[in-house]
Amino acid sequence: MKRKNCNSKGVTLLALVITIIVLLILAAVATYSGMDIIQSSKLTAFTTEMKIMQTQVNDLYDQWKNGEINKDEVGKDLTYDTTVQNQANNVLIDELGLENNFSDLTGYRYFDQETIQGLGIDGVEQEFFVNIENREVISYEGLLYDGDMYYTLNQLPQGLYNVDYDPQQGLQPSFDVSFEKIGDEKYRITISNIQYDGYIDKWYVKYQEEVADYWNTTEDMSFVVDKKVNYKVYIENGDVKSEEKLVEIVSEEFSRAHGEIDIEFLSGKTDNVTNNANAPILGTNMVPVNFNSSTNTWDEVSEENWEYSYINTPKESKWANAVMKDSSGNRTGYFVWIPRYAYKITYYDDSYTNILGYSDARGIVRVDGVEYIGGENRRKVENNYIVHPAFTNDVEVGGWDREIEGIWVAKYEASSKEGNSENEQGDNVITKTVQIKPAVKSWKNIDIGTAYTVSKNYSKENSSHLIKNSEWGAVAYLSYSNYGIGKETKIEKGKRVDAGTYYYYTGGDDNETEVYIYHVNKSTIGNVYGIYDMNGGSLEYVSAYLDNSDNQIIEKGKALVDAAVSNKLQERRTVTTYEVDETGESNRTNNYKLSSKKFGDAIYETSTSADNVLGAWQDAIAMYPFSNLQLFGRGGFWGNNYTSIFYFNCENIDTMLNSFRPVLIP
């Protein structure tokens, strides 16, 4: 009995030990499972909140691109406080390597709970670093998962990020693809609106150049390519693959033969659209004038009684006029105010019924928005209007050295106070005095260097200078719009009074009264308040040249070239240089294509070719500079049948038949 009792106790003790071991194992499993559940729940919360924020940031990106918000005013600066700045350094630079130093993190903002709640976003407890322009969402604190830190969705391994799915036979995903130019030969391709009946969170993008034989792979739905070629793109995940789509970065050119120009006036020196044109700013020794229809003269008035208007109806505007006076009170010139504005060109077929494309802040694009020419240096205002470069501080595209409210353009071609000489060399001097008056012979028999110098000397206190291509374009576009003579009317050609000579009369007549009675349609508005002689008066010089290092332009156009290469911005602002084709300066067509980098100058935007008699708008000559014909002639001359305000021709440095006109910057 005792032995039996001893055996019973032994069995009981062994069972107890086994039971304890089993319980310990179960506890360990339960603990491990509980930890795994906690980790999984953290992962789920992290990915859910990141997706919510990504959707919101995509919406903010669209709002910014449409001009509805200022991306730099959403969220808080990374210098909000020391803690935020230190975390930005840690996450964005040390962990993700997005920039080299803190000052380079210009596009990133701090989205705290106050920002997130202000945007009306629910269900998000994290805070973030956001770059709206790049559509980047980065977790402020990140997620520690399985020993690794994650700050973005794209960092998560596929097995963690994706949700199990059951692919269906023959099912293919669909997607939208778009691109935008972000730099010289750099484009951002973006995949969006992915549709698939199964459930896949993470897609892989395959892309290649259209003619390449290998595919690139990226996990980013928005990625950058650095060639201006067409690309093939598709998305995939495992056995699921979409059809290929072609991204046409190189689009087909459409005709620029017919178009309309719309104008939006801008307030002061800003890019803010306003209903009213900037009031004219009088320079030194300038006096307002109104036209007296009873006497057919211009009467000096006070600023309070100054009559001017910029009305959105062809031929109805009265552009502001003023006169320049010398120290003795004598009038030396008449000038017309061109106020700061933005513009957009809409291209049509020859019947003006179908839109083909636009020249706007995006560049020159097809009607579907696909780019043909990039939009570098184009400053956007609402509805993709471009701030006209003549009023900006971008010298490279014809701007000034500061933002300006408007320009004063000579009302007539220049003449000289001393009159014309009997021989050509007698007028090619800098000792004569510029005047801007009607019904006198234009100052011709002058070369480009002399025209540049005497224009600059005319009124130094008002920054007088020879008109640039951009300023010629600013007048042409305003004239062609509803605020001028309008697209349906062509400015009439000037009248050569003494037809047996090369001399031409300003305003189209040798009698001032008749200029204002019979020749109003020779002005840019179709009335006396406009600018004369810009179509078919004398061919005019502009302060621009093809920068091909030809010895002739360097030697004989020295004043022009010296200003263009000066280290002083006040000199460079008075000249615009045009790029020459690297394959050879004699390639006129390639030089012309390079001119598309400029805009607002009434050359590439308003013409169809580089060497066509009817290549410019209103059936005018379009002959682009090349070789030793480096200069631009604008407007045409009286005896030519193919003239308009959009006319441009290539001129030799030895040309002595052109006239010119100054511009003032108050």
Image (cartoon, rainbow, N blue to C red):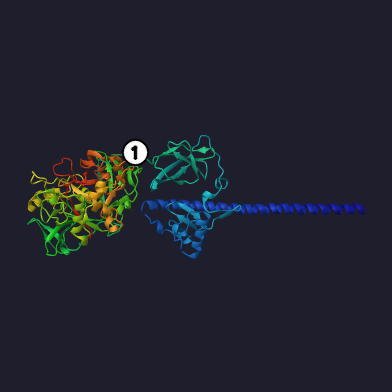
- Residue sitting at 44 percent across and 57 percent down? 104
Tell me how many marks there are: 1
For this orientation, the residue located farthest to the top is 170
Q: Nearer the viewer, residue 141 or 47?
A: 141
Which of the 4 image quarters holds residue 177?
top left
- Mark 1 Cα-neighbour bin, 10 Å: few <14, some 14–19, many ≥20: few
Q: Is residue 19 visible?
A: yes
Residue 157 placement, left or right of 402: right
The amino acid type of the residue labelled 1 equals: Glu
> Would residue 408 be visible to someone looking at this image?
no
- Residue at 11% from the left image edge and 53% from the top image edge: 438
Left or right? Give the position of 50 relative to 264.
Answer: right
Q: Residue furthest right?
A: 1
Would residue 607 be found to the left or right of residue 216 on screen?
A: left
> Which one is in front, 467 or 87?
467
Q: Which residue is mark 1?
A: 252
Residue 355: horizontal and vertical position, in percent? 29, 41
Instruction: Decide if residue 659 is on the left or right side of residue 386.
Output: left
For the residue labelled by badge 1, is the local secondary structure a helix, a strand or a loop? Answer: loop
Q: Position of residue 304 (x, y in %)?
A: 17, 64
Is 585 located above or below residue 284 in the figure?
A: above
The foreground one among 123 and 255 is 255
Residue 666, horizontal then vertical, whole percent: 22, 60
x, y percent for residue 77? 44, 61
